[in-house]
Image (cartoon, rainbow, N blue to C red):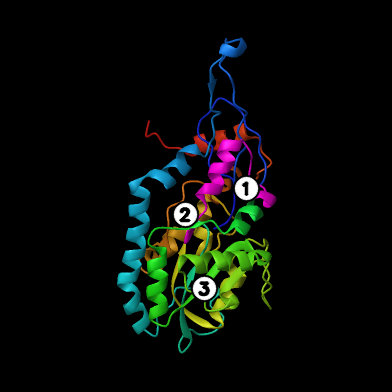
């Protein structure tokens, strides 16, 4: 997962934009026309409220995650038995996969760890994502497992398959992240299975530290990758540049891999699909970003 701002629904109010994941909310205020202590207060609108509520409370979210991991597990033995099987695209494969040890590659946030309590804190406080509050959340080691993820990871480990955690959590968050994973029952072979943002990879250059292309190349030197799991397209293959057209083209090229080698977890809260609609320009005012999303909608009218 790459940490970016959430989607903005159609709202009349303008919000303050900060950080890279969440949109700030306006303070709770008085109902228009009311005065004095009898004024009625209402919660401030927040663009991420609907998505986070769905992720925390709906049976549908749990069902979606559980069925994804169960379907992947049903195909894991066939992938392990096939020496030609590989879940890396050719541009990420540096060393031939045949004969390498098997592994599955998983993103962490919203793929195996559920960070929605952190998002709830932002919604309730009216604050936006920032690196300091995110680092504090990671240090708490309070994230819960995404439904079905622990069972799948344990089943892979029981088959001798290494679980690689390829995340855009930073390298200095390795200890806290692995401790959180271990406490929940995720298999962690050693610290080398944590591939965090900022990890140098010899002989590989990329335009952004949050891209995962180079780290997938590192994996390819050591492992035959049976499956990849994520909540963003960039967890599987890198759109360059990140445009709606390029993302659609990658789906046309690799779409058959989903449900077989690649497994996508639902995350309606944030993602690179959003900036793809407004030229990846986070400096644009929220109203301009929302207008771009409105233009992308199709009402068939």
Disc number placed over residue 248 in the picture, else none: 2
Answer yes or no: is residue 258 visible.
yes
Question: Looking at the image, is 120 positioned above or below residue 113?
Answer: above
Residue numbers of the magenta segment = 111-133
Question: Looking at the image, is 21 positioned above or below residue 79?
Answer: above
Residue 64 image point, x, y percent: 35, 54
Packing grade of label 1 (10 A; few <14, some 14-19, many >=20) is some
Disc number placed over residue 280 in the picture, else none: 1
Q: How many marks?
A: 3
The residue where tag 3 is placed is 164
Pointer 1 and pointer 2: residues touching (CB < 8 Å)? no
**Mark found first going from the N terminus, 2 or 3:** 3
Q: At 51% from the left edge and 30% from the top edge, which residue is drawn? A: 10
Q: Kindly report which numbered mark, 1 or 2, lies closer to the viewer in this rendering.
A: 1
**CA–CA distance between discs 2 and 3?**
27 Å
**Mark found first going from the N terminus, 1 or 2:** 2
């Amino acid at each position: 997962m790459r940490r970016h701002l959430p989607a903005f629904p159609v709202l009349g109010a303008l919000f303050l934009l900060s950080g890279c994941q969440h949109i700030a909310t306006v303070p709770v205020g008085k109902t228009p026309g009311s005065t004095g202590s009898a004024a009625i207060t209402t919660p401030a609108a927040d663009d991420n409220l609907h998505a986070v509520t769905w992720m925390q409370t709906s049976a549908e979210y749990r069902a979606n995650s559980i069925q994804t991991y169960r379907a992947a597990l049903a195909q894991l033995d066939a992938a392990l038995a096939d020496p030609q099987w590989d879940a890396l695209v050719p541009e990420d494969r540096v060393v031939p996969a045949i004969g390498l040890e098997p592994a599955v590659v998983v993103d962490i946030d919203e793929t195996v760890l559920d960070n929605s309590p952190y998002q709830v804190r932002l919604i309730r406080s009216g604050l936006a994502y920032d690196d300091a509050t995110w680092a504090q959340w990671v240090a708490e080691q309070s994230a819960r497992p995404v439904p079905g993820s622990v069972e799948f990871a344990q089943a892979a480990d029981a088959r001798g398959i290494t679980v690689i955690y390829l995340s855009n959590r930073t390298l200095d968050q390795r200890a806290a992240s692995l401790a959180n994973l271990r406490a929940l029952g995720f298999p962690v072979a050693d610290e080398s299975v944590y591939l965090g943002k900022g990890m140098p990879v010899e002989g590989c250059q990329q335009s952004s530290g949050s891209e995962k292309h180079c780290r997938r190349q590192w994996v390819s030197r050591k492992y035959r990758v049976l499956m990849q799991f994520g909540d963003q397209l960039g967890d599987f293959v890198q759109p360059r540049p990140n445009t709606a057209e390029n993302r659609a083209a990658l789906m046309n090229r690799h779409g058959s891999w989903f449900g077989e080698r690649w497994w996508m977890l639902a995350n309606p809260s944030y993602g690179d699909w959003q900036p793809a609609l407004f030229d990846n320009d986070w400096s644009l005012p929220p109203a301009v970003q929302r207008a771009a999303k409105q233009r992308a909608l199709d009402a068939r009218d």
